[in-house]
Amino acid sequence: MSNELLEVSEQEPTKKVFAKRTPTPKPEKVGLYFTQTKKENLEMFSSGCHLLDCVLGGGWPLGRMSNIVGDKAVGKSLIAIEACANFHYRYPKGKIIYLEAEAAFDEDYAEALGMPVKSIDFISDSITDHTVEAWFEHLDKTIKDLSKSKDPCLYIVDSLDALSDRAEKDREIDKGTFGANKPKMVGQLFRRTVKDMERTRIHLMVISQIRDNIGVSFGEKHTRTGGKAMDFYASQILWLAQLKKLKRTIRKQERVYGIQVKAQCKKNKIGLPFREAEFPIIFGYGIDDVEASLAWLESIDFDVDQWNDHKEGKKSLADGIKQIPMEERKSILMQIKDAVTINWEEIENRFMPTERKY
């Protein structure tokens, strides 16, 4: 509202005062946009683990790029498989493109974990030279097609480390620095496509392996290939770390049946950064969403005894809930999901400032 000059009196025509500015009304909760897991201006789909969705700010957003970083056998490809399953559930007619560049992908194994392999376009054979340039040519064409159709699309690269550049392929291993051009190439190509990506309904998920940051005494001891490009252009950067192996003994035989994983979102442009979640990955099953949610609720002293009737002699409450008939189970799972969402947002809100700066 513009300032209006008001006449004080007719006797003093030269003396004027300014009308008082009406303050702009502010929302009661100034941090709601940052703490809410549902964003009105963003279209998202689930990661397959509700606690991980909270860490991500609501899930995987369309029109954005994410980067999954971790050591070997920590669940990076599983995160991608579960993303495919949940994307297909949310968008049955959506397009899924999977570039498997490591030559280590088993479609039967992925299908057993719920990946809709028959609905996925595996492009490893069509990108014959497996270079960053060939991938970006395909990605650029895909984005241009999607900008016309407006169809949702999940595009996964597994992994960026397995892609070389054409200069590297033409150079012999003992000639010069191997792969020195790749970071520069990745940065140049992302600059050309990232703005076009925002105008589509695509989610680009890039998987990266970690490398030792040789010579570093302070700061990050691990890094990934591709230079700083992913740090600048990705909306979400999720680092995975294995905490422990999960073991069980049956008939005096001990077996490792899964791993406990910690995920930290080190960069988040749709939510708050540096949020963490722990969840079990069960071999042959995937992320145990129920166990992760119940463990987190117990860690904040939430009363989970209301569901103890379903334990019925099982080793854990989560195992008991999984044995319930599907119709009844859906209701309980929704109660657990709501409890996680409400408590996560309530805790986050208490960390936010009580008033806006501007």
Image (cartoon, helix red, strand yellow):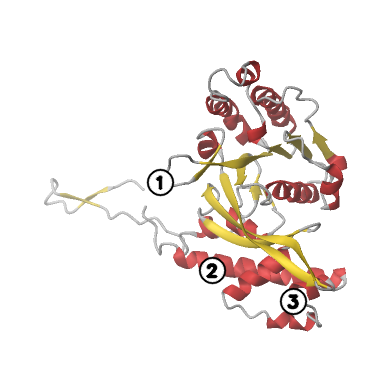
Q: Is residue 63 above or below residue 289?
A: above
Percent of width and height locating residue 78: 73, 50
Give the amino acid type for the residue marked by disc 3 in the picture.
Leu
Mark 1 closeness class: few <14, some 14–19, many ≥20 residues within 10 Å: few
Measured in 3D between alpha carbons, the distance from the residue under mark 1 to the one under mark 2, in whole angstroms, is 38 Å
Q: Which residue is mark 2?
A: 346
- Disc 2 marks a residue whose amino acid type is Glu
For label 3, the residue is 317
Which quarter of the figure has residue 208?
top right
- Residue tagged 1: 217
Element under label 2? helix
Please state the horizontal and vertical placement of residue 240, each as a whole percent of the image.
60, 52
Number of numbered markers: 3
Q: Disc 1 residue type? A: Ser
Residue occupying image coordinates x 53% and y 59%: 35
Closer to the camera: disc 1 or disc 2?
A: 1
Residue 67: image quadrant is top right
Picture coordinates of residue 98 (x, y %)? 76, 37
